[in-house]
Amino acid sequence: MKFLFWAKIHEIKDDLVVAICDEELLGKKIKIKENFEIEISEEFYGGKLIDEKNAIELIKKATIANLFGNKIVEIAIRENLIEKENVIEFKGIKHAQIIEL
């Protein structure tokens, strides 16, 4: 099965920030607590639709990567780009950040 992801590149000073989310999550809000929710916003993640191969390439180029979704996070784990113990979940949806120091 072929998965697609929304990806957007943000250039901030000397950093290449890559934001990638599973296709079906774009625009969703996840309620964490009574008065706190996370929005997987089009502004941050909604650049263009890409496939798995392009997602992996973007993550490898990034100095900071922000990943939201079970599919993209599992791919990053499989590709040894992140470690499973560094992944957090919000209401069953995986999230990870990669920062090159």
Image (cartoon, rainbow, N blue to C red):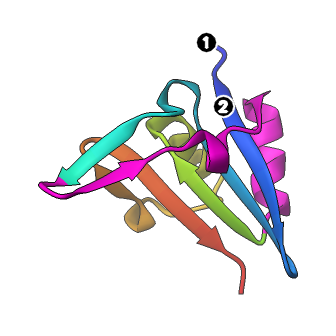
Label 2 neighbour load within 10 Å: few <14, some 14-19, many 20+: many
Residue drawn at the location 54% of the way across and 44% of the way down: 41
Name the foreground residue: 13 vs 83: 13
Name the foreground residue: 70 vs 91: 91
Residue drawn at the location 31% of the way across and 43% of the way down: 30
Residue drawn at the location 61% of the way across and 39% of the way down: 42
* Residue 5 coordinates in the image, percent (x, y): 66, 31
**Kind of residue at badge 2:** Phe
Check the picture and name the quadrant holding the N terminus.
Answer: top right
| Residue annotated with mark 1 | 1
**Kind of residue at badge 1:** Met
Q: Is residue 6 left or right of residue 40?
A: right
Distance from disc 1 to disc 2, alpha carbons, whole Å, reads: 13 Å
Residue 53 is a magenta residue: yes
| Residue annotated with mark 2 | 5
Q: Nearer the viewer, mark 1 or mark 2?
A: 2
Q: Is residue 24 left or right of residue 64?
A: left
Q: Residue most toward the top? A: 1
* Residue 65 coordinates in the image, percent (x, y): 67, 62
- The magenta region covers 33-62
Q: SS of the residue at dot 2?
A: strand
**Quarter-of-image position of residue 50:** top right
Marker disc for residue 56: none
Q: SS of the residue at dot 1?
A: loop
Residue 48 is a magenta residue: yes
Residue drawn at the location 41% of the way across and 60% of the way down: 87
Contact (CB < 8 A) between labels 1 and 2? no
Q: Is residue 19 left or right of residue 85?
A: right
The correct choice, above or below, for 82 with respect to 2 in the image is below
The correct choice, above or below, for 21 with respect to 85 in the image is above
Q: Residue most toward the bottom? A: 101
